[in-house]
Amino acid sequence: MALSTPPLSPRARRPMPAGRAILVMVIALGLGSLLNISSLREAAERQPFGWRRSVGLVLVAPLDGVSAVLGLNQPRVMLDDALGRETPGTSISTASRRPADPAFASRRAEAGAPSEEPVPVAPTPTVPATPEPRTFSAADPLRVWVIGDSLTEQLAPALKDVTAATDAAVTEHEFHYSSGLSRPDFFDWPARLDELALGADPDVWVVMVGANDAQDIRSEQGYLSVGTDAWEAEYRRRVGAVSAQLTSTGQQVVWVGQPVMRSATFAGRMNYLNSIYASEAERHEGVTYIDSWTLFQGQDGGYAAYLPDGAGTATLMRLGDGVHLTRAGGDRLAAAVFGVIDERWGLSRVASATATPASP
Amino acid sequence: MLFPTIDFAIFFVIVLTASWLLMPHRGWWKLFVLVASYVFYGWWDWRFVGLLAGSTLVNHAAATVLGRLRAGRARRLVLVVALAANLGGLAWFKYYGFFVSSAANLITGLGLEPSLPLLQIVLPVGISFFTFQAISYVVDVYRGDFRPAPLIDFAVYLSFFPQLVAGPIVRAQDLIPQLRRRQDPRSIDGSRGFWLIAGGLFKKVVVANVLATQLVDPVFANPALHSSPEILAAVYGYAVQIYADFSGYTDIAIGCALLLGFRFPRNFDVPYTARSLQDFWRRWHITLSTWLRDYLYVALGGSRGGHRRTARNLLITMLLGGLWHGAAWTFVFWGGIHGAWLAAERALSARRPADAPTSRLREVGRWFVTFHVVCLAWIFFRAESLGAAGSMLLRLMTAWGPATIVTPALVLLIAAAIAVQFVPRGVGARLQAVFSRLAPVPQGAVLALALFAIDALGPEGVAPFIYFQF
């Protein structure tokens, strides 16, 4: 069998002692850390609050100082600028790496709206205005945006197929790994949603966050331990604020709860968050809560990896981690989401008789 | 533990240093590497370590008994039991869900109520790889090609962390003799090791992840929403993505092993330059194709029984090679395309005289056809289902329209990744030689710049390697 490396010859690569290889590796990792310090800092900061995060930040802090003094953090800033990306950890509003659909952005710009500047978050819920009756079509579709964490990775493509089949709606998607509402210092969804609202101007928001949110919160009142009354009040405030923000001009919000999870501990936490989402949805007009917990329950009421698909065939719905969805799981959830959207906007009627105006 | 993470960087610096310090003390060194490898593996799920240790003990016992037995029937029985244990374990973890859900659906189809437990078996990372290594070891001992090794040697061989989870599939006769030797700390091929690690990280984090997130995943998720040019670009993009992902992993594995003083077999050799499918399989996942050749194709009779028998053996080998990746009809189709085309190539080449003239145009044509057969098979390999693969093929032929998501940068990336395979090997070797002659600080600086570029250009999040699921 051929070996990966031919025998060394003096005219080819020069062999090195092991000690030197270790030295080169340490130099590479050290200098590489200084050059990538923003990314390293972000990796430490995104850890849940606790000793691991504290140790990470303590280790990164001196490197951060050295990098700044030597100006070694600047090449990354310049490269990120050149690539149109935001350097990690340099702003509260973490920019998306998947920009909004340019077609929507340009349409909004034509209407005279600024496309870049975010607007302040609406501090209190406002009564949604009654939308004008609209006729949805391929040329002027109902615009659905799915936002959230990795649980939406399969939901959104599935919903794209369902909405595309109506010929009167399109679905766009933006998700960020490990994101949620507990840690705006890592990813600030409210700020990002403002940018999306301006750029994309959706009619329907499908929100699915929470799987990363059962962790401590840092607020003006200090650190709030997950599950305490103070934590619940703050988290509830954030859910309510996002609900108000997204419905402020009459958009529909479909708030998707967390499905039952395989780990009993994790499932318990998600059940707790679901109760917050459900009650906040009741408090905000225009917000509909989808109980995906029940949707993914087995016959015994617990976690079920296999469930019947649309044709009644037992199909794998969950990935091996007992958390995420397969595409079949995404299809199952998308059908429920579409049902809620369709109930309000009558897309099925549009699909069956394209000339019929949809009246919400 | 994933290679492109801070966790692994810290782990590897510690293990590399301790490994060379302990190298003179062979017993301690082996114990240390074994523990380090189990930590590396247990990082995913500590329960997996029990499986690895169990596989080690069972296969060691089988090899020890085989080494002592002389009688043919008893030896054969031990071999069959060992193979059944290995393949049974693999089948339980990889195929249980597929078979039980298929059976349940069949029973439901007959109007009955199934009571089969539809358990979701968590697939332990790397089980296909270390099971194949264990099988090769036991079969080699059975065939008399290799003497049974002491338990600690075999345990280190099976769990050695650089190649544990996604290959290369290293044979016992390649690695165990190296484990027994004290490696010379004054002369290691560190430059090539660093080169492979940096190149592997770039392939994985930048090339594979960018293509996946910006082109391949969106198109394969919703083929009905994409035009023919987008689907064509996504198919080419996936060909590059899976090569960059998998060969990137094995480059990092081979590079880490080199820094530790060990040589692994080559696993990829510019596969997209192949001018026939047979040539492709000499260049793609070489350690799997040679494993399938030595332990399956040859066992079936190989090419000893005439054209028809050879074609049958090729088809069976490739179908089982497809199923090795997972229990799904898409993998069966992937294997079937490769097996059928390999058989057709054999039949055609048998008719063509060995001294028949060739031309540059003919060679380009052979490359073009081979590449596109490979790409056709990749559609089935990547698609969620046969229906989705069919939808991709239908849209590829019928949905002409603008390719809005195919940016010039993506086209350039795909073209460059294929074109670079045609660059003569000497160019890379010369660059490595230049790098090897630098002082430690410039060498470290070059590598730091590579880390800088990889981290800055790679997309958000760390996607697992494709081959971790197999």
Image (cartoon, coloured by chain):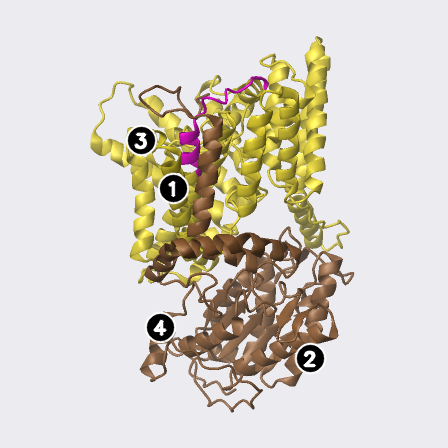
| Number of the label disc, if any, that sits on residue B434 | 3
Whether callout 4 and callout 2 share a subunit is answered yes
Residue B163 in view (yes/no)? no
Give the distance between the C-alpha atoms of the residues marked 4 and 1, in whole angstroms.
43 Å
State left or right for residue B428 relative to residue B182: left
Q: CA distance from mark 3 to mark 4?
A: 49 Å
The yellow chain is: B
Residue B248 locus on image (x, y percent): 45, 39
Asked which secondary structure carries label 2, the reply is: helix
- For badge 1, the amino acid type reads Ala
Q: Nearer the viewer, mark 4 or mark 2?
A: 2
User: Alpha-carbon neighbours of circle 1 within 10 Å: few (<14), some, or many (≥20)?
Assistant: some
Looking at the image, is mark 1 or mark 3 nearer the viewer? Answer: 1
In which image quadrant can residue A212 be found?
bottom right
From this view, report whether residue A186 is shown above or below residue B145: below
Residue closest to the eye, A59 or A196: A59
Which label sits on residue A103?
Answer: 4
Residues flagged by tags 1 and 3 on a common chain: yes
Secondary structure found at label 1? helix
Q: Amino acid at mark 2?
A: Ser
The residue mark sitting in front, 3 or 4, is: 3
- Subunit bearing disc 3: B
- Which label number is shown at residue B69? none
